[in-house]
């Protein structure tokens, strides 16, 4: 009997016979996937996260049932959906670049940081990244995936994940430049959180 | 702060909480896929619902963008929410992330939080008032389009398996689990989550929103709860005032040159005042926050951190529930009191008369009317109205 304590692989395998079991996978992962998609492309992200699960359900026989966590696989599918919206993602980022410095946020992470200026520069940094580098970086920073999980999601070797993220971060730091309050690492050293795990 | 921290805390998006409409759509879409190709044809009504919801959200978002730009937020909030107090209980539901969700909200009179003389002065000490009872119990159901709060009278007789029926709030003395079990068994509802506020937490919440303005038509007092308001008018109740107001079961009002009993039905009258208070809180917090999503997040975070929640509650759920109490999410709040009648067997106690099961949420706005003396009643009719 499958229940909410079964891991994703077990549930997905069971869903081959009892399709309703897949609903548990949905409840488990939908909020995170949806948040990630909306954060990347705005409200169209809801459609992408929705179709992610429909697609995942249809190709569930391809999921390795020994895997306990379906998140990387689902982010991979979501990533394919997001790619169709690349132009609107870039348009959004361009809009954020135009946000006036000083106009912003009642929620300061640090009073010395002008969140408006930072946001504009982050948007610019992200926009100018090659798509594949942006995907890797945001799976790391926004979806909280480990390097290994990102490798899984994007079906690329872990070394490639590492180099994409480090390249992306260098570019991001350059874009951030001398924003007040930003204490970036020296561009040559890139701490790899994924290595600690 | 390095580049990654900044990137993590930057939310180039207007939506901070999971949109329940979108979640419902996504669930339906998956359901259709699970049901097979035949069901996929009939998707039209959903499309309309989605369009309406989108239009609404788009309007909100446009305003938010015009006002605030964007919110540097969730990460910080999440880290703080990790520090909310937790209580270990087994909830009846499956800990689901999705709506509708039913939450048992309990206002506790435990004095265990008292740490300094000022608090001891204000609230008494655990030694003065040992143990804990529930001053207020309500079932709050979060739907995608509304929030419904059903008050549970403390004197309701509930059988606890072995032994004679006992009044509901006595179950709380044996801990929240005992109360949860009693409510679920007696009312036939599944409770997904549990939230508790003690006096100090309640005061924190009210002060966080800047107080709640309510009409006081005539002087009122309650020597038991410490309420004493001599000047009628529109009054901003701070945390301590509001606590004395919602706790009052022995309210007296000034009428024809003397103090008269304004709370003949004790707890039931108190419940209707609590409902007015909650209504005013939600409305005024919503107005105060306005279109500024940043301060909504900020306030929801303060409220969230003032609650004690069950150990299974996720960050999103905590934020969502806290958000509802400050008027975020759907605009409609409905209030009801569980239908009761005087107990035939035990004087001063109550028996429930209505249906049980999920339908207890179907008849909101059945707030019990007051049956005080006509003069006092009309004078007090406006008491607690938002102003």
Image (cartoon, grey):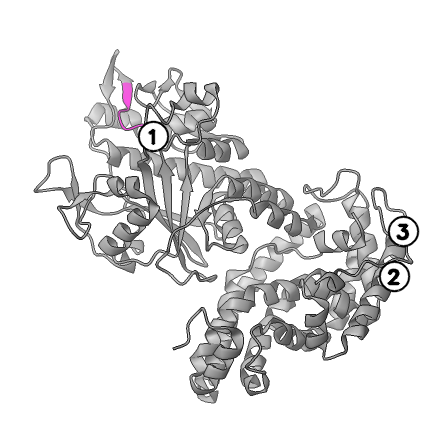
Question: Which image quadrant for residue B219?
Answer: top left
Which circle, 1 or 2, is nearer the viewer?
2
Mark 1 surroundings: few (<14), some (14-19) or many (≥20) residues within 10 A: many
Residue B250 in magenta stretch: yes
Element type where label 3 sits in the image = loop
Q: Chain of mark 1?
A: B
Question: Relative to residue B337, is residue B44 drawn left or right?
Answer: right
Where's residue A163, x and y in %?
84, 70
- The answer to whether the residues at label 1 and label 2 have Cβ atoms under 8 Å apart is no
Question: Which of the 4 quarters of the picture holds residue B129?
Answer: top left
Vertical placement of residue A21 versus B70, above or below: below
Q: Is residue B303 left or right of residue A170?
A: left
Magenta segment: does it hold B315?
A: no
Chain bearing mark 3:
A
Q: Which residue is mark 1?
A: B247
Q: Nearer the viewer, residue A156 or A48?
A: A156
Distance from disc 3 to disc 2, alpha carbons, whole Å, reads: 10 Å
Instruction: Farthest residue to the front: give it.
Output: A196
The residue labelled by disc 3 is: A177
The residue segment tinted magenta is B248-253
Q: Looking at the image, is B177 positioned above or below residue B387?
A: below
Q: Are marks 1 and 2 on the same chain?
A: no
Q: What percent of the width, then of the height, locates residue A55? A: 58, 81
- Residue extending furthest toward the left: B345
Q: Chain of mark 2?
A: A
The residue to which callout 2 is attached is A171
């Amino acid at each position: 009997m499958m229940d909410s304590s079964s891991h994703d692989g077990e549930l997905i395998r069971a869903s081959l016979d009892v399709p309703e079991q897949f609903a548990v996978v949905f409840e488990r992962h939908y909020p995170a996937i949806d948040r990630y998609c909306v954060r990347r492309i705005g409200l169209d992200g809801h459609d992408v996260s929705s179709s992610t699960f429909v697609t995942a359900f249809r190709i569930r026989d391809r999921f390795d049932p020994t895997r306990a966590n379906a998140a990387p696989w689902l982010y991979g599918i979501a990533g394919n959906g997001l790619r169709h919206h690349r132009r609107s993602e870039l348009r959004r980022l361009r809009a954020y670049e135009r946000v006036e410095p000083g106009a912003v946020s009642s929620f300061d992470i640090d009073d010395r940081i002008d969140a408006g200026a930072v946001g504009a520069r982050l948007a610019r940094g992200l926009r100018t990244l090659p798509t594949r580098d942006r995907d890797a970086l945001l799976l790391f920073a926004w979806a909280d995936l480990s390097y290994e999980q990102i490798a899984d999601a994007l079906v690329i070797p872990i070394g490639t994940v590492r180099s994409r993220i480090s390249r992306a971060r260098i570019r991001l730091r350059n874009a951030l430049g001398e924003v007040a309050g930003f204490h970036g690492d020296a561009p040559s050293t890139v701490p790899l959180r994924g290595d600690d795990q | 702060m390095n580049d990654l921290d900044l990137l993590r805390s930057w939310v180039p998006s207007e939506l901070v909480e999971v949109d329940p409409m979108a979640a419902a759509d996504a669930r339906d879409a998956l359901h259709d896929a699970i049901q097979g190709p035949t069901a996929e044809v009939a998707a039209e009504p959903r499309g309309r619902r989605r369009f309406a919801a989108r239009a609404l959200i788009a309007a909100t978002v446009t305003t938010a963008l015009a006002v605030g730009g964007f919110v540097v937020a969730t990460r910080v909030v999440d880290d703080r929410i990790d520090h909310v107090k937790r209580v270990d209980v087994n909830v009846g539901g499956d800990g689901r992330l999705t709506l509708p969700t039913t939450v048992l909200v309990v206002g506790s009179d435990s004095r265990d939080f008292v740490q300094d003389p000022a608090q001891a002065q204000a609230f008494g000490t655990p030694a003065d008032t040992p143990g804990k009872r529930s001053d207020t119990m309500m079932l709050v159901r979060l739907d995608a389009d509304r929030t419904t709060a059903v008050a549970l009278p403390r004197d309701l007789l509930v059988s606890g398996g072995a032994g004679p029926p006992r009044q509901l709030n006595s179950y709380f003395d044996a801990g929240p689990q005992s109360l949860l079990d009693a409510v679920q068994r007696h009312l036939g509802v599944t409770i997904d989550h549990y939230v508790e506020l003690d006096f100090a937490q309640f005061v924190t919440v009210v002060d966080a929103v800047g107080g709640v303005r309510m009409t006081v038509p005539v002087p009122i007092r309650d020597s038991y709860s410490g309420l004493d308001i001599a000047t009628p008018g529109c009054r901003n109740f701070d945390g301590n005032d509001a606590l004395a107001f919602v706790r009052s079961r022995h309210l007296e009002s000034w009428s024809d040159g003397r103090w008269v009993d304004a709370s003949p039905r004790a707890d039931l009258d108190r419940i209707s005042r609590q409902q007015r208070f909650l209504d005013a809180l939600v409305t005024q917090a919503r107005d105060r926050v306005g279109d500024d999503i940043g301060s909504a997040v900020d306030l929801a975070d303060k409220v969230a951190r003032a609650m004690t929640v069950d150990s299974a509650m996720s960050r999103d759920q905590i934020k969502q529930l806290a958000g509802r109490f400050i008027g975020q999410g759907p605009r409609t709040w409905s209030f009801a009191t569980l239908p009761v009648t005087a107990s035939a067997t035990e004087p001063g106690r109550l028996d429930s008369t209505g249906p049980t099961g999920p339908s207890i949420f179907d008849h909101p706005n059945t707030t019990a009317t007051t049956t005080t003396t006509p003069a006092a009643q009309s004078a007090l009719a406006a008491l607690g109205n938002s102003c």
